[in-house]
């Protein structure tokens, strides 16, 4: 499964192909000619994408179209106008079954279906999914999983499970690896779709794998804690691309998996755009750590940490959990934002449990968390120009020793060595035949 946030399977190419097919069909008389007075058509609109109208005049370059919504007449190029279906209420599961297949009818069909809470629509074996931004009852339940098992595409209403089942059956039939490419803009629902595919495969063919199935599913909260952040477009935006492999044995049962990650947005650790947050893990730690951990790791409210106070310092909680975070963990002006998916305090407890299920013992988990806290403390270390004795470079700003000491303790590094590493530059001279390291 490949999920990268870019348009890998470019739908525009499909549209272009559809348009060519449409023209071909018109030229052989399959579809009625577009231009005709009072013919209902889809015309381009900069805001709505396409609007419905009737042709009132035909020019050599453009068509005059009377919009159905506000009765205004607009001009559009011949090539940009598409025939519309007379029956605008009818929807189809597969856009290929539309009487006229073009951008206008495709968008209208998907839109009508979305209004009826049908978020999935096919274009042959491509699945279009529109983010519902709400939990739809039963859409991903175990009963739904059972109902899609072994069914061909088209036998059941469009669903991501149908696509996962097809990939599985094709793997069995051909004996070759199959790929599901998930693409779309930020916040489109790629991560949720990928999780649904994983859940479907593991639920049906992973039970025998026992703890491996569990481990596969438990990787998501871990990856999301360290690689997801709130952006202005998505409260749970993945800031990295991932390639998830699910391995099957010769009995076609899940035996394991592998996740490769690409291009983590590292700069987010040091600075965030206004209204965005650093990676979830930092807020999870502050919101969810018990008193002992909070003290051991020298934690405080987000405003105490340079790496957190530049962006949004609000915590997230799922509905009903808004009062679970202790008051003293909020900084000045920080509050709780309700979100159906992200819950800093509950997600932290879940993270600890997932790390445990993935094979890390308590000591290792504390080391991981210690490194996270150390990053926060290191962010509070500031530097000033070093003018002592005519030396160049920089030295630690007064008052930053506490943060540096805390970080060195959590990282298990000697305090002086850490200071040295932070304020010196290592160079490797190679001229003159001798090689060595020069600390400046
Ligand atoms: N099928 C769905 N059902 C319910 N809610 C959904 C669904 N898909 C997405 N959402 C909602 O939309 C939010 C964003 O979805 P998601 O994180 O999957 O987007 P994305 O495409 O992976 O974004 P990014 O590229 O920024 O990581 C989710 O946190 C969830 O609230």
Image (spheres, rainbow, N blue to C red):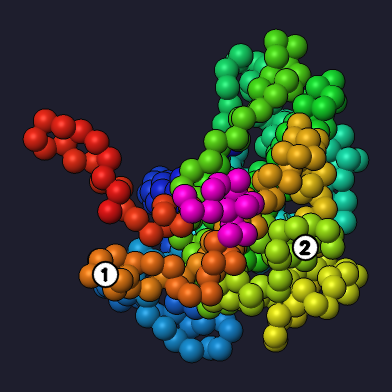
Looking at the picture, tell me which residue is in the foreground, 88 or 355.
355
Locate residue 35 relative to residue 305 in the image: left or right: left
What residue lies at 38% left-to-right and 67% top-to-bottom? 395
Q: Earlier in the sequence, mark 1 or mark 2?
A: 2
Q: Quadrant of residue 80?
A: bottom left
- The overriding secondary structure of the stretch rendered in magenta is helix
Q: Image quadrant of residue 34?
A: bottom left
Q: Is residue 74 left or right of residue 411?
A: left
Q: Residue at x 60, y 35 (%)?
A: 259
Contact between labelled residues 2 and 1, with CB atoms less than 8 Å apart:
no
Q: Residue at x 20, y 33 (%)?
A: 435
Identify the residue under disc 2: 295
Indicate the position of residue 200 as horizontal and vertical percent values. Answer: 77, 36
The quarter of the image holding the N terminus is: top right
Specify few, some or many for label 1: CA neighbours under 10 Å numbering under 14, 14-19, or 20 or more: few
Circle 2 sits in a helix, a strand or a loop, which is it? Answer: helix
Instruction: Judge whether 197 appears above or below 316 on screen.
Output: above
Report the mark closest to the observer, 1 or 2. 1
Position of residue 147 relative to residue 326, above or below, is above
Name the residue located 53 percent from the left edge and 74 percent from the top edge: 399
Quadrant for ligand 1? bottom right
Tag shown at residue 389: 1
Q: Position of residue 214 (x, y in %)?
A: 81, 33
Give SS at disc 1: helix
Marks 1/2: CA distance? 39 Å
Nearer to the camera, 159 or 366 = 366
Magenta-drawn segment: 405-417
Which is more toward the observer, 403 or 159? Answer: 403
């Amino acid at each position: 499964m490949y999920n990268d946030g870019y348009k890998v399977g470019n739908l525009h190419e499909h549209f272009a192909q559809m348009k060519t097919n449409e023209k071909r069909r018109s030229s052989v008389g399959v579809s009625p000619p577009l231009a005709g007075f009072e013919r209902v058509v889809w015309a381009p609109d900069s805001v709505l994408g396409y609007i419905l109208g009737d042709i009132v005049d035909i020019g050599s370059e453009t068509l005059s179209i009377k919009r159905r919504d506000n009765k205004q007449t607009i001009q559009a190029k011949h090539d940009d106008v598409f025939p519309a279906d007379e029956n605008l209420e009818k929807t189809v599961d597969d856009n290929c079954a539309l009487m006229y297949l073009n951008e206008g009818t495709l968008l209208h069909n998907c839109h009508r279906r979305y209004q009826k809470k049908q978020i999935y629509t096919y274009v042959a074996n491509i699945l279009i999914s529109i983010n519902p931004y709400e939990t739809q009852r039963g859409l991903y339940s175990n009963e739904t999983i059972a109902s899609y098992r072994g069914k061909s595409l088209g036998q059941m209403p469009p669903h991501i499970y149908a696509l996962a089942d097809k990939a599985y059956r094709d793997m069995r039939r051909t004996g070759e690896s199959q790929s599901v490419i998930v693409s779309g803009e930020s916040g489109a629902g790629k991560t949720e779709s990928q999780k649904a595919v994983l859940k479907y495969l593991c639920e049906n063919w992973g039970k025998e794998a026992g703890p491996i199935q569990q481990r596969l599913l438990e990787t998501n909260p871990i990856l999301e804690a360290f690689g997801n952040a709130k952006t202005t477009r998505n409260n749970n935006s993945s800031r990295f691309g991932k390639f998830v492999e699910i391995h099957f044995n010769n009995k076609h049962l899940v035996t394991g998996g592998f996740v490769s990650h690409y291009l983590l947005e590292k700069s987010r650790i040091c600075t965030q755009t206004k209204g965005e947050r650093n990676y979830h893990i930092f807020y999870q730690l502050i919101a969810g750590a018990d008193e002992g951990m909070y003290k051991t790791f020298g934690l405080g409210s987000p405003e105490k940490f340079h790496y957190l106070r530049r962006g949004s310092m609000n915590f997230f909680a799922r509905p009903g959990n808004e009062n679970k975070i202790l008051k003293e963990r909020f900084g000045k002006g920080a509050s709780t934002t309700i979100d159906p998916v992200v819950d800093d305090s509950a997600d932290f407890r879940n993270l600890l449990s997932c790390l445990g299920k993935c094979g890390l013992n308590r000591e290792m988990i504390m080391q991981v968390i210690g490194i996270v806290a150390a990053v926060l403390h290191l962010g509070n270390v500031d530097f000033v120009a070093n003018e002592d004795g005519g030396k160049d470079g920089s030295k630690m700003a007064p008052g930053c020793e506490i943060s540096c000491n805390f970080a060195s303790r959590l990282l298990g590094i000697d305090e002086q060595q850490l200071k040295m590493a932070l304020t010196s530059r290592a160079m490797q001279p190679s001229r003159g035949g001798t090689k060595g390291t020069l600390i400046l």
